[in-house]
Amino acid sequence: MILALVLLAAVLFAACGDDAGDPTTTTLPEGSVIAEFETPDGARYRVLLIGASAEAARAAFAAGTYPGIPNGLIRPGDGEVNLGHEWHVTEVEFADMAIEACDGTVSYIDDLGYEAFVAQHGDRFCPWSAELVDLIER
């Protein structure tokens, strides 16, 4: 009886698996793409791009050009895309210019924390020097 319970527990535990590092488990909307950006501190973050933002990122990445400053709403939780962080960015658009208050780096937000970042800088994140380093298609 004890052996049966141990085996059942082992099967259930194995079924839970840890796939937190693999963005392929996220179901993405049609035509969307996950964009990975690197800020000057060398840290990276990922955002889900849809619509015109997804197309602009694809075109810029293919051409080796800069799509613009990623500017979006910062929200709590990883959003199933920004794995390894306690925040994510939604409604991303690319801008030619942005206000200084939303500039920053990934490490700055991680060190400060989501709540403190929003309290001090508002609910937008627009890292001026972020570079598009990868696109993850589905």
Image: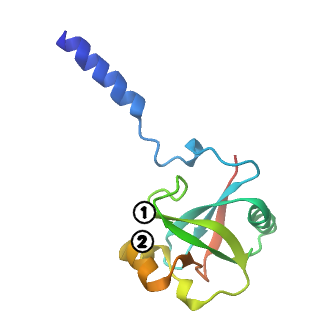
Q: Is mark 2 on a helix, strand or loop?
A: helix
* Numbered disc total: 2
Disc 2 + disc 1, Cβ < 8 Å: yes
Label 1, secondary structure: give it: loop
55 lies above or below 72: above
Q: Position of residue 125 (x, y in %)?
A: 56, 77
The percent position of residue 25, horizontal first and vertical second, equals: 56, 42
- How far apart marks 2 and 1 lie (CA) works out to 7 Å
Check disc 2 and report the residue beneath it: 114
Label 2: how many Cα within 10 Å (few below 14, some 14–19, many 20+): many
Report which quarter residue 64 is drawn in: bottom right
Residue at the spot 44% in from the left edge and 62% down from the top edge: 85
Residue 39 locus on image (x, y percent): 55, 76
* Picture quadrant of residue 129: bottom right
Q: In this image, 118 relative to 138: left or right?
A: left
Disc sitting over residue 58 in the figure: none
Residue placed farthest to the top in the image? Answer: 1
Residue at x 48%, y 56% (from the top left corner): 83
Give the residue drawn at x 44%, y 58%. 84
Return the disc, 2 or 1, that comes first in the chain's sequence. 1
| Picture colour scheme | rainbow
| 16 horizontally vs 4: left or right | right
Residue bearing the label numbered 1:
86
Quadrant holding the N terminus:
top left
Residue type (three-letter) at the residue carrying disc 1: Glu
Q: What's under tag 2, amino acid-wise?
A: Tyr
Neighbourhood count class around disc 1 (C-alpha, 10 Å): few under 14, some 14–19, many 20 upward: some
